[in-house]
Image (spheres, rainbow, N blue to C red):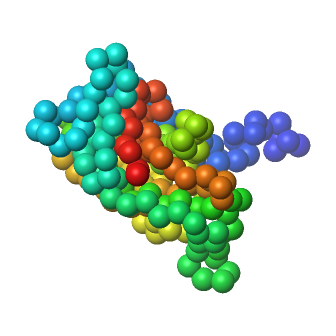
């Protein structure tokens, strides 16, 4: 009878511990980035430009783009896949089409920062935003480096972020963030 009076948290200790870690990671990510967003270009003619009215920086493929503590380099974009997975038993089907974005993320700050694929977006020509499909990302990035990584200063991770977008759409821009609350930086995918 005493077992029935225990709280949900006491009954589900493993889930409680996992939940606590998720909450800590989200809070650390929220406090670690965002307001100090650095969208400036280096002025070295690399193609990264910024307008006077504080619009987001726009970089091109294979060019560095910075937001907060992260420097992003989008290396490739491949769309049109309808199924991804490692074999016939471990696959995921797209609602529309999968777009795989190969990205390198480097911590340019002075403390560790959590990178979450769920903070990243793809935009079409009408500026409709598409969220990352983390479940599909598990099938592509086997070391999960771009699903979630705590990146120390000077270190970088490279991997693939997966997006599920309609078959009739083409991603024009990637909007990349160092945290859920940062301004973000745009990368032209064309």
Left or right, 19 with respect to 49, comes to: right
User: In percent of the image, x 58 and y 62: which residue is there?
Assistant: 98
Left or right: 174, with 65 as reference point:
right
How many numbered marks appear? 0
Q: Residue furthest top?
A: 53
Q: Residue at x 46, y 27 (%)?
A: 181
Q: Quadrant of residue 146?
A: bottom left
Is residue 20 something that shows in the picture? no
Q: Position of residue 174 (x, y in %)?
A: 44, 44
Q: Is residue 113 above or below residue 79?
A: above
Question: Is the N terminus in the top left, top right, bottom left or bottom right quadrant?
Answer: top right
**Is 87 left, or right, of 151 in this rendering?**
right
Residue 134's place in the image compared with 4, above or below, is below
Q: Residue at x 25, y 45 (%)?
A: 64
Q: Nearer the viewer, residue 102 or 186?
A: 186
Res. 56 image quadrant? top left
Q: Nearer the viewer, residue 14 or 48?
A: 48
Q: Position of residue 104 (x, y in %)?
A: 31, 54
Give percent across and percent down for residue 144.
45, 61
Identify the residue shown where x is 73% and y is 45%. 11
Above or below: residue 44 compared with residue 136: above
Picture coordinates of residue 132, whole percent (x, y): 55, 49
Query: Relative to 84, is 59 on the left or the right?
Result: left
Asked whether the viewer can see residue 61, the reply is yes
Closer-to-camera residue (87/98) = 98
The image quarter in which residue 6 lies = top right
């Amino acid at each position: 009878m005493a077992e029935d009076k225990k709280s949900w948290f006491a009954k589900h200790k493993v889930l409680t511990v996992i939940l606590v870690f998720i909450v800590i990671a989200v809070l650390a990510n929220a406090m670690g980035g965002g307001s100090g967003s650095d969208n400036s270009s280096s002025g070295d003619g690399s193609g990264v430009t910024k307008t006077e009215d504080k619009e987001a920086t726009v970089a091109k493929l294979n060019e560095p783009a910075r937001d907060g503590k992260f420097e992003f380099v989008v290396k490739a974009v491949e769309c049109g896949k309808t199924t991804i997975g490692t074999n016939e038993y471990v696959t995921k089907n797209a609602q529309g089409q999968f777009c795989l974005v190969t990205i390198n993320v480097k911590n340019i700050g002075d403390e560790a920062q959590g990178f979450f694929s769920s903070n990243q977006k793809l935009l079409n020509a009408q500026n409709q935003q598409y969220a990352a499909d983390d479940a599909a990302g598990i099938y592509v990035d086997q070391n999960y480096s771009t699903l979630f990584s705590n990146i120390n200063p000077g270190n970088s991770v490279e991997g693939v972020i997966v997006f599920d977008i309609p078959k009739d759409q083409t991603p024009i821009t990637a909007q990349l963030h160092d945290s859920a609350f940062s301004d973000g930086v745009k990368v032209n995918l064309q």
